Image (cartoon, rainbow, N blue to C red):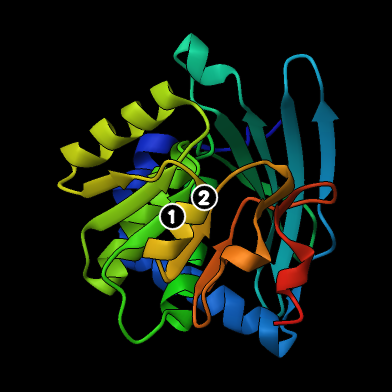
Amino acid sequence: MTTIPVIALETIQASLTEADILDAVKGALMAQARGDVNSPPPGMLQLDNPDGECHIKYGHLKGSDTFVIKIACGFYENPKMGLSASSGMMVVFDAKTGVPVCILDDKGWLTNARTAAAGALAAQAGAPPSVDRVGIIGTGEQAALQAKWTCKLLGIKSVTVYGRTASHVKDYVERMAQDGFSVTIAPDIATLMKSCNLVITTTPSNAALIMADDVRPGTHIVAMGTDNPGKQELDAALFPR
């Protein structure tokens, strides 16, 4: 029996730069827009105790020799146990035979980097002409990655953050400060929206967080957390605008 090669996280990280990931994600988004990607709707397994979810996603770029199935998990109580909230792996298959080629044991790192890159590219594409800070709603892993990748693309170092839990906000500010970012804490989302014209949401919320009346004209919002039915971060009244 043939053993399927397993590519370790360390090997994956050593093989990719942020520029590589940004280029790959940008290329994938453009291919998707052209209709060159076969990517069915994702599967999602919701777990209630503890709060967790497992996403199964798949894709094939037309003409590619391989296709990929990804398993990505998010368990939101993990940080209390010193574990990452996200984990997962990817399986690469031969597109002509369906035979597994290798397993990418990325432990969720590729998913996190992909998501950060997609958010940063979306922020860059729609950013107002003058942006001096990024507003971040949420304090988890993606809240930090979205801020870092977006700020790097835009050439800024200032962030305003809102989070529901004071201890999580404090930890977020400390983590970002270690990487040289200046972080201002907003007491509520309405206040954050008054000071930021580029805002990224990174929560698993199932109810609107940003209300239409709080959004100034010209504000660009990247809603990254709403990734499956039942989640909501934006007031529905925003969409007609």
Q: Residue at x 24, y 31 (%)?
A: 174
Q: Height in image: 20 above or below 115?
A: below
* Element carrying mark 1: helix
With respect to residue 183, does 149 lie above or below?
below
| Residue that label 2 marks | 189
The amino acid pointed to by label 2 is Ile
- Number of other residues with Cα within 10 Å of mark 1, as a class: few under 14, some 14 to 19, many 20 or more: many
User: Does residue 14 sit above or below 213 in this rendering?
Assistant: above
Depth check, front residue: 85 or 18: 85
Amino acid on which disc 1 is placed: Leu
Give the camera-side residue of 105 and 94.
Answer: 105
Mark 2 surroundings: few (<14), some (14-19) or many (≥20) residues within 10 A: some
Q: Do we see residue 114 in this rendering?
A: no
The label number, if any, that marks residue 192 in the structure image: 1
228 on left or right of 224: right
Give SS at disc 2.
helix
- The image position of residue 25, as x and y in percent, is 51, 69
Give the residue displayed 44% in from the left and 52% down from the top: 136
The spot of residue 127 in percent (x, y) is 42, 79
Q: Quadrant of the C terminus?
A: bottom right
**Numbered disc total:** 2
Lateral position of residue 190 relative to residue 209, left or right: left
Q: Is residue 21 left or right of residue 138?
A: left
